């Protein structure tokens, strides 16, 4: 019985780790990259804000 409970805990921990990584990779990371690129594009200034912003996103691995 104790072995079954231990295996359930291990499975739950693995699931939580996978979900945590997925949240980081698909939600947190892109949001932080967009914030950073927005700041970079604002600081560069000029009339090419969109071009600078898109270029920064592409440099960091985001398409849009």
Image (cartoon, rainbow, N blue to C red):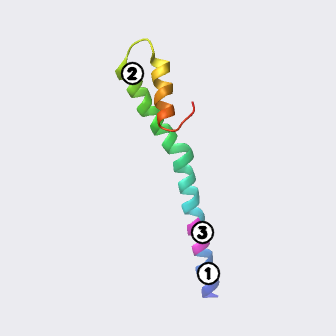
- Cβ–Cβ below 8 Å for labels 1 and 3? no
Residue 51's x, y, as percent?
49, 20
Q: Residues within 10 Å of mark 2 (few under 14, many from 20)?
A: some
Q: Residues within 10 Å of mark 1 (few under 14, many from 20)?
A: few
Q: Residues within 10 Å of mark 3 (few under 14, many from 20)?
A: few
Instruction: Say above or below: 55 vs 15.
Output: above
Along the polypeptide, which appears first: circle 2 or circle 1? 1
Instruction: Say above or below: 23 vs 18.
Output: above
Measured in 3D between alpha carbons, the distance from the residue under mark 1 to the one under mark 3, in whole angstroms, is 11 Å
Locate residue 27 relative to residue 44 in the image: left or right: right
Residue that badge 2 annotates: 42
Q: Which mark is residue 12?
A: 3
Along the polypeptide, which appears first: circle 1 or circle 3? 1
Q: Residue furthest left?
A: 43
Secondary element under disc 1, as helix, strand or loop, is helix
Q: Please identify the quarter of the rendering in which residue 26 is found.
A: top right
Secondary element under disc 2, as helix, strand or loop, is helix
Residue that badge 1 annotates: 5
Q: Which span of residues is magenta-colored?
A: 10-14
- Cβ–Cβ below 8 Å for labels 2 and 3? no
Instruction: Say above or below: 54 vs 20.
Output: above
Measured in 3D between alpha carbons, the distance from the residue under mark 2 to the one under mark 1, in whole angstroms, is 54 Å
Residue 50's x, y, as percent?
50, 19
Residue under the image location 54 percent in, 43 percent down: 27
Q: Which mark is residue 15?
A: none
Secondary element under disc 3, as helix, strand or loop, is helix
Q: Nearer the viewer, mark 2 or mark 1?
A: 2
């Amino acid at each position: 019985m104790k072995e079954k409970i231990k295996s359930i805990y291990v499975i739950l921990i693995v699931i939580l780790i996978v979900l945590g990584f997925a949240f980081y990779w698909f939600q947190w990371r892109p949001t932080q990259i967009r914030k950073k690129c927005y700041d970079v594009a604002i600081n560069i200034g000029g009339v090419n804000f969109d071009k600078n912003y898109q270029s920064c996103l592409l440099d960091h691995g985001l398409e849009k």
